[in-house]
Image (cartoon, helix red, strand yellow):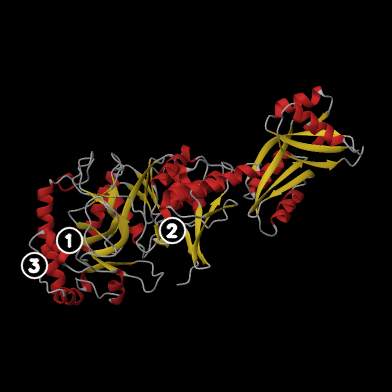
Amino acid sequence: MYFNEEFETLPRPALEALQLKRLQVVVERVYANVPFYKDSFDRAGLKPADVRSLDDLQRFPFTTKQNMRDSYPYGLFAAPLEEVVRIHASSGTTGKPTVVGYTQKDIETWSELMARSFMAAGAHRGDIIHNAYGYGLFTGGLGAHYGAERLGASVIPISGGNTKRQIMIMQDFGSTVLTCTPSYSLFMAEEASAAGIDFKKLKLRIGIFGAEPWSEAMRGEIEAKLNLSAIDIYGLSEIMGPGVAIECIEAKKGLHIWEDHFIPEIIDPATGLRLPDGELGELVITTITKQGIPLIRYRTRDITSITYEPCVCGRTHARINRMCGRSDDMLIIRGVNVFPSQIESILVGIEGVEPHYLLIVDRKDNLDTLEVHVEVDEGIFSDEIKILQLLSKRIEKEIKDVLGITCTAKLVEPKTLQRSEGKATRVIDKRKF
Amino acid sequence: MKVEQISIFIENKSGRLAEITRILGENGINIRALSLADTSDFGILRLIVNDVERANQVLKGKGFTVNKTEVVAVEVPDRPGGLGAILQTLDTESINVEYMYAFVEHCGGNAVIIFRFDETDKAIEVLKVNNFSVLSGERLYSM
């Protein structure tokens, strides 16, 4: 089922022709309206007319999160403020937030892309969408909300927090689609089970989870505990918000990125050079229809790979793989690149182990150390010491086998690791560089 | 003739044992026997209590990981060689003891040994055939 069949299934040559036309327009536009881009293109010796093919895009300089911070708050806006009808900002945990503005047209585009995403996930008019993404400066809540309305579904703007009430409302209102972060969905399942509520009796059919990386193994966990089909959605406020890319329910194998609005590239984060299809690297996105704050070659810092192979669902848009971390979440432990999600999938693969873990990286005697804290629940607990010791040994061995690094597994009491209603803290890096 | 034992996972950090005994005390649960097995990181507290279901329920309610296991309680005369005779018999029958702990009855003066076997039913059979006094759960909980 498509929301916009014509564009979602546009044959590649037509899609690419459309991309080129739109790219030329946007490059022209930012060069004329945004001083940052004029300087940046001038310094690279490039003019908008240099975009003759899609391949020419890779000659253009990147835009980074730092560039956005430097132009705080409105420096990168390409539309006058009078045309901006909405302002969002990303969490400013590491400094000033990054600010994005949307024109009326941008809001319409976003709503459509989010509606397409809902439909790709298997949702439709008549669904009751329980939207537990936070409403506010964060794009998650309102982004999903507008998309749900455009789809014609009934949206419950519950936002995040107050888990007990969330569960009551899901039960009483008969919610059929849940949207939230994957870790929050598991948190809800735990709370429900503690309150004696069986998630399997709820009407939930589909869960659309995003805003933090998660693993295939965690999908299995969520689907079993919440009794729904779990779909991965991708988005970031700098580019638009939720709905930049989504898995289709037919394949659940890679996220279709809406290429009539975005041009994706995968680069080597170290060299900045484009990587061949299928190779793991940093996702770079150019927005080709945005008016408020169009970005050219924005470095998302998300690590993934891309494929242009046709998909069973009939959509012609490329698929990016499940995000396997952030280029800046990547831990380098004794010279090995490690993404927390890799450890997560190892843990969930061990029978009985819950996906609640914490990685503690430290440096002792000039050597990096990794401690993996894993919660002991009834599934793995035994009254015999040796069984628990074998379990820690097994965790250590599997991590060593898969990642090639030695770690210490430590079993901890359940619910001692921080649960979060937003993004989960998975790593504590105590090293001082 | 089996006895239900509860086991609780505890991290090696201060106050956990006190917390568990406080919870049991507040809920009127009496501890009949206990053993603590520990490693450098964690411990397993094993308890025989007068109300297994209630202990299990209140501790789970407080977020502890709790398991129930079947163990065997054997009454031994409190004199030299009492335990040795039992272990000798078990060894002869190739029954493996996973762990054990003991306490002394406050009336009667006999010792009670709690055994965790890999083959509980077979162990009970062997002990009975050899005329050892295997105690029932009811007897133990109400001691």
Q: Residue furthest top?
A: B129
Rendering coords of residue A53 (x, y %): 9, 59
Q: Nearer the viewer, residue B1 or A131?
A: B1
Can I make out residue A311 in this image?
yes
- Amino acid type at image mark 1: Ile
Identify which residue is drawn at 51% across, 55% down.
Answer: A407
Query: SS of the residue at dot 3?
Result: helix
- Amino acid type at image mark 3: Asp
Quarter of the image with the N terminus of chain A is top left
**The disc numbered 1 marks a residue on which chain?**
A
Looking at the rendered image, the disc whose residue lies closer to the viewer, 3 or 1, is: 3
Kindly identify which residue carries mark 2: A423
Query: SS of the residue at dot 1?
Result: loop
Rendering coords of residue A252 (x, y %): 31, 42
Can I make out residue A169 in this image?
no
Binning the other alpha carbons within 10 Å of mark 2 as few (below 14), some (14 to 19) or many (20 upward) gives some
Binning the other alpha carbons within 10 Å of mark 1 as few (below 14), some (14 to 19) or many (20 upward) gives many
- Amino acid type at image mark 2: Lys
Identify which residue is drawn at 17% across, 63% down.
Answer: A58
Rendering coords of residue A397 (x, y %): 50, 48
Q: Nearer the viewer, residue A119 or A313?
A: A313
Q: Which mark is residue A288?
A: 1
Binning the other alpha carbons within 10 Å of mark 3 as few (below 14), some (14 to 19) or many (20 upward) gives some
Q: Is residue A325 above or below residue A383?
A: below
Whether marks 1 and 2 lie on the same chain: yes
**The disc numbered 2 marks a residue on which chain?**
A
Kindly identify which residue carries mark 3: A50
Gap in Å between the C-alphas at discs 3 and 1? 16 Å
Q: Along the polypeptide, which appears first: circle 2 or circle 3?
A: 3
Q: Along the polypeptide, which appears first: circle 1 or circle 2?
A: 1
Gap in Å between the C-alphas at discs 1 and 2? 29 Å
Q: Is the C-beta separation of discs 2 and 3 under 8 Å?
A: no
